[in-house]
Amino acid sequence: MRFRIRPIETTFYDLFSQMAAQLVSGADLLASLLDPQTDEKDLADQMRTAEHEADEMSHEIVRRANSTFITPFDREDIYRLAGALDDVMDFMEETVDLVNLYGLGHLPADFAPQVEVLQRATQLTAESMPRLRTMKDLDEYWIEINRLENQGDRTYRRIVAHLFSGSYKSLEVLKLKDITDSLEHAIDALESVANTVEQIAVKES
């Protein structure tokens, strides 16, 4: 029988859940760019605040991992999961910032399916993070995230094809290609989160 010198620090579970919830808020902010009435400059400020808050959560997780004797799972996995969650927010903030910097005002309707994939993936991630405590019922999460990532890939290719169809001016194509790339990176980062959760669950099973 293995004895523990001191109780395992469980605050990590709460912090991961908070970070995942922050991603949902970020995705919802980003989705408002589909509305032509949105003030993109105000939205960019809100998104920077949300990204800063996510950074603080990530730093707190790393600080606790560095100072905690017994962590709930491998220290390196804690670092990787915190980094992957932070990457998602970084790419979402980048998307909003590019729309603002490029003076586009809002996203074309063609981008709605890609944004919807991102929103659904963040919601699934937020719903699944609390289950890290038990490592149970997580299989459907990473399977569905993988399906959504594949859907995101298909959506991305359709958007790129339409951008180069002649419907947009050359400069608009370059700007919008940067933005759909950032959205694609955010969705890919969510898959990295799910892959990390899967690896953690396998180790802990």
Image (cartoon, rainbow, N blue to C red):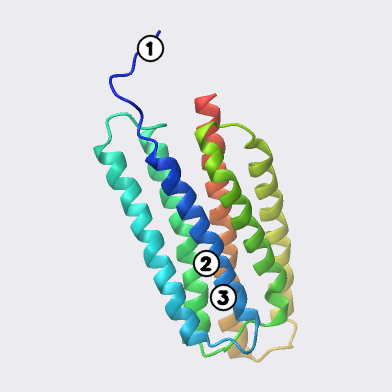
Which amino acid does the dot numbered 2 rest on?
A: Gly
Viewer-nearest of discs 2 and 3: 2
Residue at 63 percent of width and 43 percent of height: 142
In the rendered structure, which amino acid carries the disc numbered 1? Arg
Q: Local crowd at mark 2 within 10 Å, few (<14), some, or many (≥20)?
A: many
Distance from the alpha carbon under mark 2 to that under mark 1: 42 Å
Residue position for label 1 = 2
- In the image, is residue 95 above or below residue 75? below
Looking at the image, which is closer to me, 201 or 21?
Answer: 21
Q: Residues within 10 Å of mark 3 (few under 14, many from 20)?
A: many
Residue 60 percent across, percent down from the top left: 32, 51
Q: Which residue is mark 3?
A: 179
Query: Which image quadrant is residue 180 in?
Result: bottom right
Sooner in the amino-acid sequence: mark 2 or mark 3: 2
- Which amino acid, mark 3? Ile
200 versus 62 height, above or below: above
**Residue 76 placement, left or right of 169:** left
Q: Residues within 10 Å of mark 1 (few under 14, many from 20)?
A: few
Q: Which residue is mark 2?
A: 26
Figure quadrant of the C terminus = top right
- Residue 191, position in %: x, y? 58, 50
Mark found first going from the N terminus, 1 or 3: 1
Give left or right: position of 63 versus 77: left
Front-lying residue, 101 or 21: 21
Residue 83 location in percent, x, y? 41, 51
Q: Quote the CA–CA distance across marks 2 and 3.
A: 16 Å
